[in-house]
Amino acid sequence: MKQKRTSRRILWILLAVLVLLLCWASNEQRLRPAYLGIARFENKIKGIDGISAASVAEVKGDARRHSRAIRTVFGLFGKAKEAPEANYDDFVDLAEFIPDAILEIRYHTSYNFVGVPIDGYEQPTALLTREAAEALLAVSDDLKEQGYRIKIFDAYRPQCAVDHFVRWAADVSDTLMKPYFYPDLDKSVLFEQEYIMEKSGHTRGSTVDLTLFDMATEREVDMGGTFDWFGEESHPDYTATITPEQFALRMLLRDAMVRHGFKTLDSEWWHFTLKDEPYPDTYFTFPVRQYE
Ligand SMILES: [Zn+2]
């Protein structure tokens, strides 16, 4: 009798360990290094040093499929915690992480080039991967010493928001915000000239759109062009119509970002991506809002 009870207890412990293991493995980002380790080990047994790029891609695909399958099984027993690819565990809320930053999350409002709040922006929140947020905090401290605060327009952008932009761009008759964002541009060229694309670096969670806020005047600085303007004036090095003061401010922002590990974009003075981004090929889907 006692033996039976002991074996039942062992069975419960094993079951609990299995559930914990499945919870852990339901996250693609955690499963991937484990799978890569196994692949390396298998190769070592075969006498091969390291793994090929093709094998890495295969292992990543396996990790994605298996973690999705586990989440689907969990979903059968209750509400699935998150959609595939969703993983906000490693993201931080910039309002908390960089208290000096000013937030004006345009895609949560109607004042953007579409003219309505964008899909996926449930709250006026800015999220970034921890690595990008740490670099941005260093930028913020650096600029504060020079008399400026950072003002953020956008950070992590879910895929459904990018899909919303694509749908909007395909409808050439919808020109509601043309006077404010692209008065001189025919909407039909937005795809061709790459103003709108089907994938955005923002969806990988380490890209941010921002400007400077002057602490002396208590105003956003004049960069000689506005956020999300579709035109050459947005190129950081555009000098035809912008003044030396405006150019100097663009360079002040750019230098601070580059100094702390971000890379620039040739077509938008406000857009920067962390050079060593932690998820270079993951396009996240979870919505923009505060997470516990
Ligand atoms: Zn951007």
Image (cartoon, helix red, strand yellow):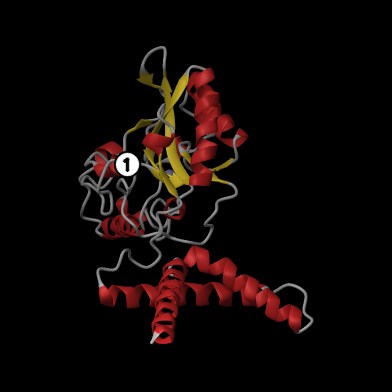
283 sits to left or right of 110: right
Q: Is mark 1 within 8 Å of ligand 1?
A: no
Type of amino acid at the residue the image marks with label 1: Thr
Secondary structure beneath dot 1 equals: loop
Q: Position of residue 90 (x, y in %)?
A: 46, 52
Q: Which residue sits furthest front?
A: 1
Residue at 31% x, 54% y is 287
Q: Quadrant of residue 112?
A: top left
Residue at 28% x, 53% y is 120
Judging depth in this view, the residue of 280 and 227 nearest the camera is: 280
53 sits to left or right of 213: right
Ligand 1 located in image quadrant:
top left
Q: Position of residue 229 (x, y in %)?
A: 37, 39
Quarter that holds the N terminus = bottom left
Is residue 239 visible in the rendered structure shown here?
no
Q: Quadrant of residue 86?
A: bottom left
Q: Which residue is mark 1?
A: 125
Q: Position of residue 240 (x, y in %)?
A: 50, 29
240 sits to left or right of 259: left
Is residue 287 visible in the rendered structure shown here?
yes
| Vertical placement of residue 230 versus 86, above or below | above
Judging depth in this view, the residue of 183 and 226 nearest the camera is: 226
Q: Quadrant of residue 17?
A: bottom left
Residue at 27% x, 77% y is 76
| Vertical placement of residue 9 versus 181, above or below | below
Residue at 40% x, 54% y is 88
Judging depth in this view, the residue of 80 and 182 nearest the camera is: 80
